[in-house]
Image (cartoon, rainbow, N blue to C red):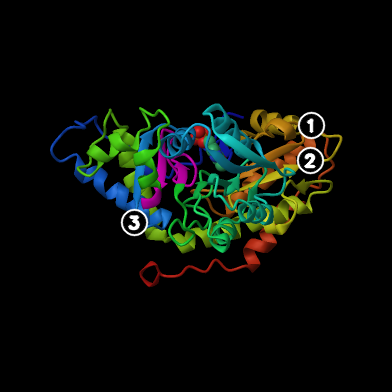
Amino acid sequence: MKTGQSHLFIPGPTNIPDRVRRAMNVPMEDMRAPDFGELTKPLFEGLKRVFQMTSGRVFMFPGSGTGAWESAITNTLNAGDKVLMSRFGQFSHLWVDMAQRLGLDVQCIDVEWGKGVPVVEYAKILDADKSHSIRAVFITQNETATGVTSDVAGVRAALDATGHPALLFVDGVSSIASIDFRFEEWGVDLAVAGSQKGFMLPAGLSMLGVSEKALDASRTARMPRCYFSFDDMLKLNDDGYFPYTPPTQLFHGLREALALIEEEGLQNIFARHNRLAEGVRRGILAWDGCSLCAHSPQWYSDTVSAIVVPENIDAREVIRSGYERHRTSFGSGLSKVMGKVFRIGHLGDLNEVMCLTALASAEMALRDAGAKVEFGSGVAAAQDWYSSSQSVEISVAAE
Ligand SMILES: *Cc1c(COP(=O)(O)O)cnc(C)c1O
């Protein structure tokens, strides 16, 4: 069927609100004009509020989230530096891979996919590192491949308990602006985000929150960096300019997205994601033979659910049928879980009925792929939840 809308339920790029899309439809402009800073300077301030930080800096590099990963590492560390990381899904895996390729000495803890950052093990390793040879600790706050959220505050507490001075790196690409992330309170030093997930924009802007401590580290770190240099940005950003051509359309979109975020209020956004996600999870768990990749509620992600299909079913068929017959895009199973998992992204510009649509479409796609899912079972479970739970909105002024 070619009529009507198609449905995007991948965990990024996410649906772009009409207001944001219209805001980007502007003529090209002069990025060296005397008043260009009027557009860009408030964006840095707005991003700081979303990251929940008051000191330090936010950088915006043309690029995707991966660019901000690279920027965070190359600006603050040296080749051969020892870093502590963990791997439990495709995104945490790729960050480890990048760190190794950039010459870091990575101590990587492999964790079963479906669980997240091993806070207790981190704490033990940090405690044993009396000489403070570990320069940085890395966390993927939300592992998008498995739908697993980890405890950033717990890792901060482990660092504090041992008085360990390592820098704290957080990948927040699929969490920041959707689920609670507190740069300052959690003592994060480098926080990575991207435009195409919680920020409801096209891909193309990588954002990076940087603490004063990380800025200090960048002044002495010697890893080569050029395009992603903090220094080059610092020289121009205060006046609202960039060392190379910035994506001005995306800035217009970001201005509108930040306005939407502030109108709804961060706490309301987090609560909405939690409530919508809970409905999707109840739907998934009502399907016969299906389960969540996340092992237990402690790990559940409010931005993406990874669904393990019944043994005899190929999840790729679910995704193919979703796309071809029902015009619905689901996220695929990446790497180790290919064929076993498909994903429903539930972040960004989203409401209850959209989530019900995703579940209804998935039920049909699962049946097409041979699963014995009872039609309406997941949809009904989600409907029950949405109609019985209240969406409570606090007034933004009271935040
Ligand atoms: C999407 C994603 C990335 C990679 O971002 P790109 O924008 O594709 O470079 C990194 N980490 C996480 C957790 C992600 O979800």
37 to the left or right of 75: left
Secondary structure found at label 2: loop
Quadrant of the image containing the C terminus? bottom left
Residue designated by label 1: 314
Residue 330 visible in image: no
- Residue 235, by quadrant, is top left
Q: In the rendered structure, which amino acid carries the disc numbered 1?
A: Asp
385 to the left or right of 350: right
Q: CA distance from mark 3 to mark 2?
A: 45 Å
Q: CA distance from mark 3 to mark 1?
A: 49 Å
Is 211 a magenta residue?
yes
Q: Is mark 3 within 8 Å of ligand 1?
A: no
Give residue 55's mark. Answer: 3
Magenta-tinted stretch: 191-213
Quadrant of the image containing the N terminus? top right
- Residue 55, by quadrant, is bottom left
Q: Residue at the right extreme?
A: 312
Q: Indicate the position of residue 256 as horizontal and vertical percent values.
A: 34, 47
Task: Name above or below for residue 302 compared with residue 395.
Answer: above
Closest to the observer: 148 or 356?
148
Residue designated by label 2: 309
Task: Name above or below for residue 232 compared with residue 117.
Answer: above
- Give neighbour class at mark 3: few <14, some 14-19, many 20+ (Cα, 10 Å): few
